[in-house]
Amino acid sequence: MSEPPAAVSDAMYYTEAADLAAVRAFVRSHALAFGLLPARTDLLLLAVTELATNTLQHTTGGGRIRVWAEPDQIVCDVLDQGPLRGSAPVMPPANALGGRGLAIVERICDEVTVTADRDGTLVRLRLRF
């Protein structure tokens, strides 16, 4: 997976649930500043919140968010130290108590790429302008 442009040095780190409001504010301000429409920004916020919450529930050490613009889209990375679990996201049965996060993210973003190595997992989200 390609690295973000060298100019993308701004990142938001989060380690606890109390940080989620700051994560959303960080992503919102960047997305709107880059020109993503408010309704599309709301989708990005939902996706990032799902992923960041998963990080906090299933890993240790928190995570990191990066956001940048490419010519026709916003790109957002959510990185953590957790291992990749399972294969393609599948929506669990209606009576399941959880497990919908990544499946929801897949449905609301234009592209979602998940990669993992010994250092953790990177989920890259793309939403077109």
Image (cartoon, rainbow, N blue to C red):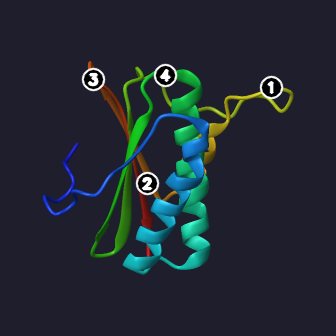
What residue did someone put label 4 on? 59
What residue did someone put label 2 on? 111
Residue type (three-letter) at the residue carrying disc 2: Glu
| Mark 1 and mark 2: Cα distance apart in space | 26 Å
What residue did someone put label 1 on? 96
The residue shown at (50%, 20%) is: 86
Q: Secondary structure at mark 4?
A: loop
| Mark 3 and mark 2: Cα distance apart in space | 23 Å
Nearer the observer: mark 1 or 3; the answer is: 3
| Mark 1 and mark 3: Cα distance apart in space | 30 Å
Locate residue 14, reporting x and y percent. 46, 41
The residue shown at (53%, 60%) is: 44
- Few, some or many residues within 10 Å of mark 1 (<14, 14–19, 20+): few
Which is more N-terminal, label 2 or label 1?
1
Locate residue 94, reporting x and y percent. 83, 33
Name the mark on residue 119. Answer: 3
Q: Quadrant of the N terminus?
A: top left
| Mark 1 and mark 4: Cα distance apart in space | 21 Å
Residue type (three-letter) at the residue carrying disc 3: Asp
Locate residue 73, reporting x and y percent. 37, 70
Residue type (three-letter) at the residue carrying disc 4: Thr
Q: Secondary structure at mark 1?
A: loop
Left or right of 66: which side holds 86?
Answer: right
Residue type (three-letter) at the residue carrying disc 1: Ala
Q: Quadrant of residue 67?
A: bottom left
- Asked if marks 2 and 4 touch (Cβ < 8 Å), the reply is no
Q: Is residue 115 above or below residue 77?
A: above
- Few, some or many residues within 10 Å of mark 4 (<14, 14–19, 20+): some
Nearer the observer: mark 2 or 4; the answer is: 4
Decide which of 12, 3 is in the foreground and name it.
Answer: 12
Left or right of 60: which side holds 3?
Answer: left
